[in-house]
Amino acid sequence: GMSATTANMYRMVSIAEAQETVLKAISPLPVMSIGLMDAMGYILGKNVIAREPLPPFPASIKDGYAVVSSDGIGDYDVAFEALAGTAAGHLKAGTVAYITTGAPLPHGADAVVQIENTEKLPPGPEGQQRVRIVKPAKGPRDDVRALGSDIAAGEVVLAAGSLIGAAEIGLLATVGRATVKVRRKALVAVLSTGDELVEPDQDALGPGQIRDANRFMLAAAARSAGCNVVDLGIARDDPAQVEAKFQEALSTGVEVLLTSGGVSVGDRDFIKPILERQGTVHFGKVRMKPGKPLTFATINATASRSSSGQLVVFGLPGNPVSSIVTFNLVVLPALRAMAGWPEPRLRRVHARTQTDIKLDPERPEYHRVSLHWHRTGESAGELAAASTGGQISSRLLSMRSANALLELPAAQGVLPAGSIVSALLIDDLGSMPVPEGIPMIVPAL
Amino acid sequence: GMSATTANMYRMVSIAEAQETVLKAISPLPVMSIGLMDAMGYILGKNVIAREPLPPFPASIKDGYAVVSSDGIGDYDVAFEALAGTAAGHLKAGTVAYITTGAPLPHGADAVVQIENTEKLPPGPEGQQRVRIVKPAKGPRDDVRALGSDIAAGEVVLAAGSLIGAAEIGLLATVGRATVKVRRKALVAVLSTGDELVEPDQDALGPGQIRDANRFMLAAAARSAGCNVVDLGIARDDPAQVEAKFQEALSTGVEVLLTSGGVSVGDRDFIKPILERQGTVHFGKVRMKPGKPLTFATINATASRSSSGQLVVFGLPGNPVSSIVTFNLVVLPALRAMAGWPEPRLRRVHARTQTDIKLDPERPEYHRVSLHWHRTGESAGELAAASTGGQISSRLLSMRSANALLELPAAQGVLPAGSIVSALLIDDLGSMPVPEGIPMIVPAL
Ligand SMILES: [Mg+2]
Ligand SMILES: [Mg+2]
């Protein structure tokens, strides 16, 4: 039936206030140990310090001959081979040692002459290898990496708070960290609510039915952020059923619950009353388009098995665009903050609009665009923003290929094409479109 | 011993030629079916067409009352409730129906009045619900999504070649695709070669030893591209052992083999001779810094179980920076092309240098930088490039936090700070540093 709504009790907060409220309410999750190969995408929980110098010995940079640099050009006996992975030998002045890249420089040698600057000679009278140094070493240390020149012993190679990518994995391997201390990532549960929803694999739609998209989209987005996801399925528009799902989230030990639907202004909004009973609703309405019904609550879960001791709940709107836009603007920074990102907010850039855009007089709007790089004349280049078309919040096609959200002010009228606006990155520009060839710039020297 | 080298047989090719050669030698992998929730990061193999319109019925955009718009303001009996997930009822003029967001508009109704524009009245004489319409619908279709207004039946919602992200997962769910046709991704094997290498978990280093970083770094980079990785371990500097690893790669059915080490100009280079015996070496030397020894070969593997019918081999240099830079410049575009990316190459942008940079007179150099957004005055903003410091190819710290490679020309002298140069993106700018606060731009209207 038509029970009393609580939605109107909520003050409409700004998006900035909403983001701040969320980031204040959560904390980074505990640090855990993880195998090196699984550490990608995590934030390092502790400084990593090199125990040894790298290289751990003076090492050859080239394949060639270890020499006493003052010996200069001339013909030499090859006294021995200094191979990678062996102990450094002892070289006498007046002789050279064949050496491979990365091998320890023999004691007594002070430089390397690369093989291209040498000529092999016929063996000497006693069958010994001989070589001609055609171009001498430039002096001591030529083509030699000094001990500790890449990494000093005791150096912080990666600071706590670093995001671990492929290069960082390489650094961790180099300094002998087969396991790594990283911040945990939130376990996230997704729940869709609505009597109209059916699973995507349902063949034919019954009267009034549509397929659930949000649960799959939000789960994918949370996984993109590196989170594991628990699928709580679909709850009917029935307070008891929704409440049972909340209990399931609490008992599963998830740190974050994402619901979609059931938070808009009508009578049939079950999410806010349940949240009010179980915890604290920090906001229930945000001045933004799309996404106005966005709701945020925390439940202090003594009964919860979550490692943070609380369940954070985002009541996302049911319209698919609203749910993914609010995910990006509010949930993703929260997941990043829990994962230990020092700067969890979306990255802001500026972009030039390619078409006129009608503004909303009442709410700041997050207009979905596809950014690409563009350069005219001698400029440093800029980001051009192509609108994804009709922005109604039910039209998920407006999120297709979107890699940024323009931050449009609430204002009357039309923003003319060619305007510069702020934009928040929501996808990797490493896959941005390339509608124009982007030429290399060869700087004038 | 010192056997004859083959490295000098190879013409030094340009990086552009190397990239073109690689992209010509490979083809997109076959299309396969995958579950919706596992489709993130894949390229769609076939157009996806909507079978039904969305919404599949005229639907309310708001919680409120379905009305005959010409009825206007006034007090009305609430004839019934039109709830989400139910069949559309029939509304008589002069009455209204309570309606929830997403519910089918009753037959006979032509608009919705949102609940904020209504007032509940006391029940009527026969106990019927009554409501006052305070602000009327603007006309037919007000707050109603027309059938098919978000997605038309027969519309291509996602084209073959689309990269699947969270929004695309949502679209696929919406149109009922619980499984999706995507391009396979390459199975990649990694192999490190060198007598000097030990595993990262080895506690103390013996004489001449260093820890293997490349295998872990390259495996992580390949996994970032969504590939599964087979770890072939470390091969000693022994042709028989290296050749056995090649056989293992062939019999495992991998499509791509990444070796590191053993390709530089000295005598101890085992990779090229093996590749020459087993297949075609397309190039063995590239005019670039770092990465000159980069080698590329294809082995037509009738014996191979790879789905592409060939094994593609990248012989990457042993220096860790060289290996990860050449991975990004040459291997990653190849993996993307195999995965079906329409534009597999790294995205080029332009950036302004923050420090003087010494150029290399002989080879174009890929200088590692950390890009961040910067704006002065009224400009559209630009990317500022902070060098990661000393660029010697053994110094993996130069890759730490690097998100782009500057494309510096081979030239004498120094590129002054403040120059605009081309840069290739190698990491997600969504995690770029924010050394300066980036203010919102509120466009003047
Ligand atoms: Mg609903
Ligand atoms: Mg080697």
Image (tube, coloured by chain):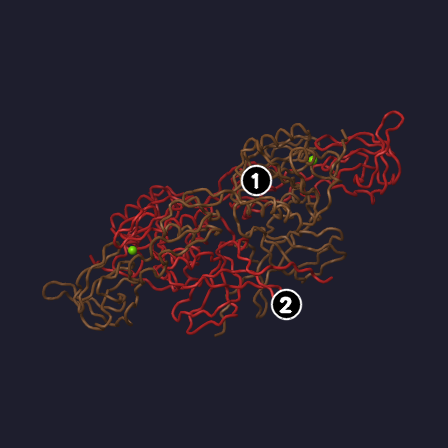
Chain colours: A brown, B red
- Residue A121 appears at what percent x and percent y? 18, 67
Q: Give neighbour class at mark 1: few <14, some 14-19, many 20+ (Cα, 10 Å).
A: many
Q: Quadrant of residue A36?
A: top left
Q: Secondary structure at mark 1?
A: helix
**In this image, B168 relative to A32: left or right?**
right
Give the residue type that dot 1 points to.
Ala
Q: Position of residue B176 (x, y in %)?
A: 60, 36
**The quadrant where residue B437 appears:** bottom right
Rendered position, A304 above or below A59: above
Q: Which residue appears at 13% of the width and 63% of the height?
A: A128
| Along the viewing direction, whichever of B445 and A121 lies nearer the viewer | B445
Q: Is residue B6 above or below residue B104?
A: below
Q: Is residue B272 visible?
A: no
Residue holding disc 1: A219
Q: Chain of mark 1?
A: A
User: Disc 2 sits on a residue from what chain?
Assistant: B
Q: Which residue is mark 2?
A: B377
Three-letter code for the amino acid on which mark 2 is drawn:
Gly
Instruction: Pick the residue in front: B101 or B393.
Output: B393
Q: Quadrant of the C terminus of chain B?
A: bottom right
> In this orientation, does residue B418 appear?
yes
Residue A315 position (above or below residue A174): above
Q: Residue furthest left?
A: A126
